[in-house]
Amino acid sequence: MPLAQPATPTRLRFAVLGPLTGEAGGRPLALGPLKQRLVLAVLLSRANTAVPVDLLTDAVWPEEPPRTARKNLQVYICTLRTLLGREEGPDRLSHSAAGYLLRVAEPELDLLRFRALARAGRAAADGGALAPAARLLRQALDLWQGPPLADLRRSPAVAAEADRLEARCLGVHEDWAETELELGNAGAVAEDLAELAERHPLRERLQAARMNALHLSGRQAEALAVYDTHRQLLARELGLEPSPALTARYRELLARGRSLPTAARPDRGTGPGGSLLPADTADFTGRTDELRQLVDELGSGGGRVAVLTGPAGSGKTALAVHAGHLLADRFPDGRVLVRLRTEDGAARPLPEVLAELAALTSRPGAAPTGADRTGPGPADPTQPDTAPADTARAAALWRASLAGRRLLLVLDDAPGEAVVRELLPGFGPSAVLVTSRGQLAGLASVRRIAVPPLAPAEALDLLGRIVGTGRTGADRAAAARIAAACGLLPLAVRVAGTRLAVLRHLPLAEYAARLEDPAGALDELVAGDVTVRARLDSGWRDLTDQGRLALARLAALPLALLFTLPEAAAALGRPERLALRTLEALTDTGAVTSPTGEVTAHAALYALPRLTHLHARERAVRTAVGAPETVGAPETVGAPQTAVAAPARSPEPV
């Protein structure tokens, strides 16, 4: 018997909002053996997005993949291609350096229909069309046929995807309940939420909707009991109190009779439950794929963590802030950004970060102050000798305060894993978005999203938005030269554009020539108090002495040249084995770029980003570094591991 039945592509339908099923022309499809179904489940749960090979491998072989895992995976992919059938245009199931991508149209997958209906319902509600909104949200919920991928949850990777989908369903259920309450349909909401609220007792928004529904149905005692049960559970399990908003609603119910809930729909724009993000970038350009990945990863909550990595000036913070604003409706308890470095690029002490977070969110978790401490020692919690036990307790209180809350935490410019690990929620619906020049390889169970330089067309578009499309259109060749001389980095393009916007008399061709001159390019990239050199200086300081020396030696290679491992070894004066480790360590810090696909060490082509290259040359001349024999020792090339003091804790689970 064949592994799977081929189907006519135009008549395919798949379902993941329940057991994994497929049909063609109304007839069930045989989806093959368990491992093949696991591959299909992951591809469908991330439809129209490239899925890394490592994630598929983990889904199929969670324990120890066999040596033939890659070949077996290719067999499953080949069989799935037969199942999907052939049609004109791009392959339904294609492969690239980023992984495997399954193209599915909205009518062909219940998950895509669910997302579309939910988006339409939320948009209608935001526009005041409550009745259509409630209808659309209900249609989205009706697509669910039970726990998602219920038959495949023995695989931890598939179970994680299923949990993400289920968290998204809960958010839509809460949207529907709040909309129906505003329409006056409290009785239906009270009955619908009874079982759901019992299964998710720590989900505060769900409990608030049920409490309001019971109150408006005339069941005052039951409404008050919902709050009391929730309060006792939080105190017993987490040592916390309900949020101020829910407590205020409880007091209203005690003081008032039957009335429309004053907080049926959360205020998503102001106060501690709104946005504490910087203003969005008005001329934000590009990053469509990265944004789609972020919204899909973080929008479901469920404790998801995403890490944006890329070289200095690649626009990681702007992308994180833009994504945070797009995700406003997914995080009713707020969106908060905290910077993990000072203005000069130094790592901030963990107690100082904890104190800021506690102040911003008005929740427990503040670092101890002098008034809270006993015994000798400094009262300033930002000093290095703050008691480790006090810091560990403050970090634990912060993590506990996130339980049951749906908050987006943006940790900007992380210098290392230690401080990030202390701030991640242990469980609950909150999500975390981290930006870092390095890969933060010590963090497990996170989604890493690379933020490369812009595409040439995107960089040109950004420049045009700043200086005016008429000016760039009049000399597109010079504008393209400016973007290329900026290394296609958003920060550099923005600084160059701002400079040109001020110097209206300066011809684009003349400014392009200035930027193309290696000796003066960094001097030209200054606009007011914003300089590209300052950002590059911070990355340079992150490296150890040996890392800086290795980068300076690589900078002696020709500008804009892709180089191989043997060429790097010659420049470093080290054997290829040690040179490879040096390149990998510099890649981890963002100083060197490497291929995105899988290639052998000798086939790989490496590069220094143009501005990093120029800066390393400049620093090498300024510091006149020597050449000790320990150049390129892999354990000493990357950023120092003691940059941020964090209390010891057990290794995080993998």
Image (tube, rainbow, N blue to C red):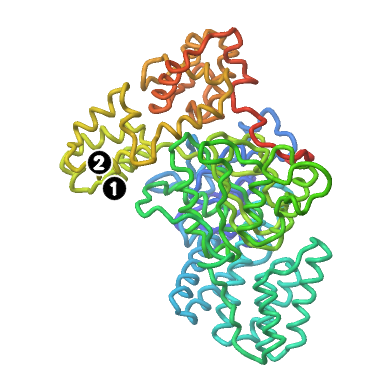
| Residue 469: image location, x then y, percent | 22, 48
- In-image side of 435 versus 512 (left or right): right
- The kind of residue tagged 1 is Ile
| Residue 471: image location, x then y, percent | 19, 45
Residue 323: assigned label: none
Is residue 653 something one can see in this rendering?
A: no
- Give 376 or 122, whichever is nearer the viewer: 376
Q: Nearer the viewer, mark 2 or mark 1?
A: 2
Distance Cα–Cα, label 2 vs label 1: 9 Å
| Residue 414: image location, x then y, percent | 58, 40
Number of disc labels: 2
Label 2 with label 1: CB-CB less than 8 Å: yes
Give the residue drawn at x 17%, y 36%.
Answer: 507
Give the residue drawn at x 56%, y 46%.
Answer: 339
Location of residue 37 with respect to 142 vertically, above or below: above
Looking at the rendering, in which quadrant would you find the C terminus? top right
- Give 29 or 470, whichever is nearer the viewer: 470
Which of the 4 image quarters holds residue 428?
Answer: bottom right
Crowd tier of the residue under label 2, counting other residues whose Cα lies within 10 Å: few below 14, some 14–19, many 20 or above: many
| Residue 22: image location, x then y, percent | 58, 57
Whichever of labels 2 and 1 marks the residue nearer the N terminus, that label is: 1
- Give 144 or 314, whichever is nearer the viewer: 314
Location of residue 177 with respect to 50 vertically, above or below: below
- The kind of residue tagged 2 is Leu
Dot 1 falls on a residue whose secondary structure is: helix
Residue annotated with mark 1: 466
- In-image side of 567 versus 403 (left or right): left
Location of residue 615 with respect to 338 vertically, above or below: above
Looking at the rendering, in which quadrant would you find the N terminus? top right
Which of the 4 image quarters holds residue 639?
Answer: top right
Residue annotated with mark 2: 500
